[in-house]
Image: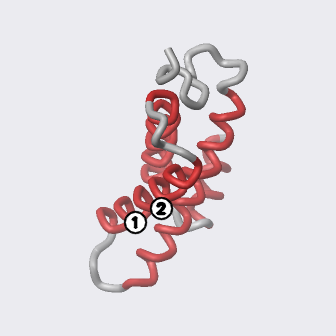
Amino acid sequence: MYEQVAEVLRQLGLPPAQAVTGIVLAILLRYARGMFHSITSEWTYFTAVSFGVLGALLDSSGTDWKPIVRETLALSALVLILQKVLETAAKTVPWLPQDNEWANK
């Protein structure tokens, strides 16, 4: 199963190690949405794209811009999709905060 997921991620342009980084970033973003009122859907999108750009730049060799753009889009999409999954899961999973849950206390 792991090999199949890793192969799908490679086909999308993300090495498995970078995909794990995307998972960690999505979890951090979920916690940030639980703690701060200012992190709305717009800021979530901006943050995910920023994470994608930063991750792609850190992983790049600096010789060609096409892999950077591909990895930016893939990593940004991964963080946004996982963020939406975690948002839905936060309704039933007790250790995941819902939006502004801690900021309202």
Q: Nearer the viewer, residue 103 or 81?
A: 103
Residue 17 left/right relative to 99: left
Establish if 52 lies above or below 22.
below
Where disc 2 sits, the SS reads helix
Residue 88 left/right relative to 19: right
Q: Which residue is mark 1?
A: 53
Residue 27 at x, y = what percent? 50, 35
Cβ–Cβ under 8 Å for marks 1 and 2: yes
Establish if 80 lies above or below 68.
above
The residue sitting at 41% across, 75% down in the picture is 68
Quadrant assignment, res 97:
top right
Q: Nearer the viewer, residue 1 or 76?
A: 76
Quadrant assignment, res 7:
bottom right
Establish if 72 lies above or below 90.
below
The residue sitting at 66% across, 18% down in the picture is 93
Query: Which numbered tag is attached to residue 49?
Result: 2
Where disc 1 sits, the SS reads helix
Query: Which numbered tag is attached to residue 104?
Result: none
Residue 79 at x, y = what percent? 54, 50
Q: Nearer the viewer, residue 6 or 39?
A: 39
Q: Amino acid at mark 2?
A: Val
Residue 60 left/right relative to 92: left
Residue 14 at x, y = what percent? 51, 61
Q: Nearer the viewer, residue 43 or 20?
A: 43
Residue 89 left/right relative to 22: right
